[in-house]
């Protein structure tokens, strides 16, 4: 059983604070500014979400970013897409991180502070999504690297906005603005950036007054379909992504 003091300072890319009522705020960052996603954060976030889900004193969780974006840049540092051993690590972490988010058995609010150009599937596993006017959703890096977008973004966008819209979003690397995302069901509210966290906290504190079992079991009840989708599809999607990565590596080696 985890307790907050035991993991609060354990994650260099997540700033954790918790109110007296049990509302946990998780701000992803790199050196205090917008997160640069890499292989180290990929590994780190598996443990981060596990620790959050294992702490019975967390009553509601707010997930947000830092600086001007939620997550829009990626670095190859710490990743090995092109060897079987390296991709096995990505495969295992990619499956586990989404299930660990779903294993956070309390209401989860995503406070999206700006553009999300990778791993927007994290946000789609939240129960409530608040966005700012500057928020843009896009799946940018997969096709830039020449690999299949099979890490869950392929499944969850089709589930949330519809299969035809979801496939178009992935295949064209569509930039989905906040207003369109709200109209299509991926965002609940659009809030000025200066009021984003205040609104998230307002909702969270209201939810924190519910009986513990009520709020916990409501989260479980609301995410059963998502759990099935992730469990059935992410492993297969990541396997396809790995095959495409191996082909990219082969082609790159042949052209040297």
Image (cartoon, helix red, strand yellow):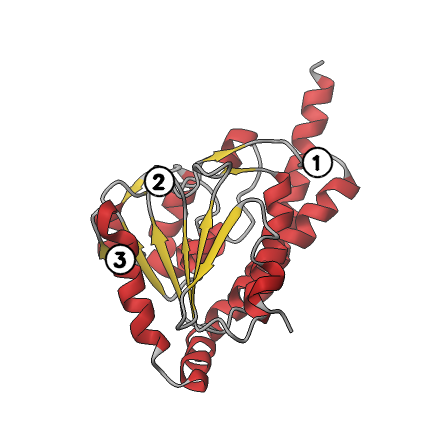
In this view of the protein, which residue sits in the foreground, 31 or 78? Answer: 31
Say which label, 2 or 1, has the lower sequence index: 1
Q: Please tell me which residue is depicted at 46% across the width and 39% down the height of the picture.
A: 32
Residue beneath label 1, please?
80
Label 3: element kind: helix
Is 254 situated left or right of 60 in this image?
Answer: right
Is 85 situated left or right of 116 in this image?
Answer: right
Residue beneath label 2, please?
115
Does the image show residue 187?
no
Does the image show residue 117?
yes
Point out residue 43 in the picture as x, y percentages from the top left corner. 65, 48
Distance from the alpha carbon under mark 2 to that under mark 1: 26 Å
Residue beneath label 3, please?
198
| Above or below: residue 235 compared with residue 73 | below
Rate crowding at label 3 as few (under 14), some (14 to 19) or many (20 or more) other CA atoms within 10 Å: few
* View extreme (right): residue: 85
Say which label, 1 or 3, has the lower sequence index: 1
Distance from the alpha carbon under mark 2 to that under mark 3: 19 Å
Is 64 situated left or right of 16 in this image?
Answer: left
Label 1: element kind: loop
Q: Are marks 1 and 3 in contact (CB under 8 Å)?
A: no
Distance from the alpha carbon under mark 1 to that under mark 3: 39 Å
Label 2: element kind: loop
> Quadrant of the image for the N terminus?
bottom right
Say which label, 2 or 3, has the lower sequence index: 2
């Amino acid at each position: 059983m985890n307790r907050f003091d035991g993991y609060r300072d354990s994650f260099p890319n997540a700033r954790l604070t918790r109110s007296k009522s049990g509302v946990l705020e998780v701000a992803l960052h790199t050196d205090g500014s917008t997160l640069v996603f890499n292989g180290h954060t990929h590994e780190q976030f598996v443990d981060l979400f596990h620790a959050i889900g294992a702490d019975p004193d967390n009553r509601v969780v707010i997930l947000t970013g830092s600086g001007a974006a939620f997550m829009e840049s990626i670095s190859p540092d710490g990743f090995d897409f092109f060897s079987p051993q390296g991709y096995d690590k990505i495969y295992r972490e990619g499956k586990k991180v989404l299930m660990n988010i779903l294993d956070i058995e309390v209401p989860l609010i995503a406070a999206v502070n700006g553009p999300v150009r990778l791993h927007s599937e994290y946000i789609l596993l939240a129960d409530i999504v608040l966005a700012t006017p500057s928020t843009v959703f896009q799946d940018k890096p997969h096709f830039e690297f020449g690999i299949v977008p099979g890490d869950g973004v392929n499944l969850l966008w089709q589930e949330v906005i519809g299969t035809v819209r979801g496939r178009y979003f992935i295949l064209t690397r569509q930039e989905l603005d906040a207003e369109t995302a709200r109209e299509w069901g991926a965002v609940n509210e659009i809030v000025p950036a200066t009021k984003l966290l205040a609104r998230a906290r307002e909702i969270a504190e209201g939810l924190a007054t519910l009986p513990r079992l009520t709020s916990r079991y409501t989260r479980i009840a609301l995410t059963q379909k998502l759990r099935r989708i992730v469990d059935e599809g992410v492993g297969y999607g990541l396997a396809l992504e790995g095959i495409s990565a191996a082909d990219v590596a082969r082609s790159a080696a042949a052209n040297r």
